[in-house]
Image: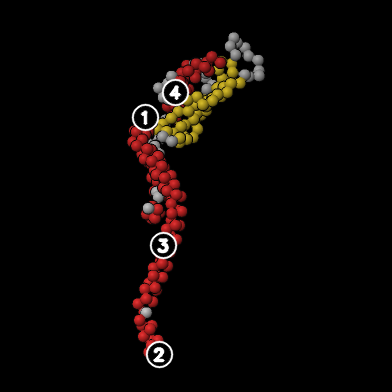
Amino acid sequence: MKDLLSNILSKLHLIIFLYGAWSFYTVYSDYETQLAEITQQRPAIEDEIKKAEQKLGQIDEFRKNVDQTKLRVNEVFGNIEKVQRQLPSEINDIEVLDYLSKEGRSLNMPELEPNPREEQPLGFYISKQYNIKGKATFLQFVVFLERINGAERLFNVKNFKIITPVEAQKGRFQVVDFDTTIDTFKFNSSHKESSGVDEIVSEIEGAATERKPRGRKREAAE
């Protein structure tokens, strides 16, 4: 028994060495397996990184042009605000109706009937329509529209309809019934125009953050 124990003790260092070598081989084998997996994944990871960098390059190019784009857009919206300030602040129905009626009387159109409608907000300005009905010769009606076009206040002829009466008429010139709608405008003080540039930049920057390659994958590839 003592001889057996002595024999085992004399070979203990060899047993320990073999066990250590086996443990080292096991760990090294696992490392080689992981390294092989990473090596196989490396082309796909590098391709993903390359695509992400390309997209980031496009975003950087966009950012370089943002300042110029902002200047152009701000110039356009500055002109819009300038036009907005040139529009009257209020629409006085009495003044508008009096102007239309006076122009009708000066052209011998006594049956002119202008009627105001509701105001309609349209962004930086507010539109108000007036429906006008009456009787006149075709020439009188055309001259009436020309005078409206030359007025100090901005008017827009939205539509018109001319109807020839069925009953027979006396006189040299044919009298027609007309029905037209015109717009006039005032600025909308409660509206602030937005260029949309800041929103676009925010979306681009958000997309850049989401598409940015992860540092952990890059380290693994290396």
Q: Nearer the viewer, mark 4 or mark 1?
A: 1
Q: Amino acid at mark 1?
A: Asn
| Badge 1 or badge 3: first in the primary sequence | 3
Distance CA(mark 1)–CA(mark 2): 109 Å
Q: Nearer the viewer, mark 2 or mark 3?
A: 2
- The residue sitting at 50% across, 16% down in the picture is 143
Q: Which residue is mark 2?
A: 1
In contact (CB < 8 Å): disc 1 and disc 3: no
- Whether residue 4 is visible here, answered yes or no, is yes
Q: Are marks 1 and 2 in contact (CB under 8 Å)?
A: no
Query: Which residue is tagged 1?
Result: 79
Q: Name the mark nearer the viewer: 1 or 3.
A: 3
- Tell me, for residue 99, which label it has, or none: 4
Hey, which residue is sitting farthest top in the picture?
172
Residues at discs 4 and 3 in contact (Cβ within 8 Å): no
Q: Position of residue 26 (x, y in %)?
A: 42, 67
Q: Secondary structure at mark 1?
A: helix
Q: Residue furthest bottom?
A: 1
User: Which type of secondary structure does the marked residue at label 4 adopt?
Assistant: helix
Q: Name which residue type carries label 4.
A: Tyr
Question: Crowdedness of circle 3 by 10 Å Cα count: few (<14), some, many (20+)?
Answer: few
Looking at numbered disc 2 in the image, what kind of residue is underneath it?
Met
Q: Earlier in the sequence, mark 4 or mark 3?
A: 3
Circle 2: element type: loop
Q: Which residue is mark 3?
A: 31
Which label lies toward us, 1 or 2?
2
Report, in whole angstroms, how far the alpha carbon at label 2 lies from the one at label 3: 43 Å
Q: Which mark is residue 220?
A: none
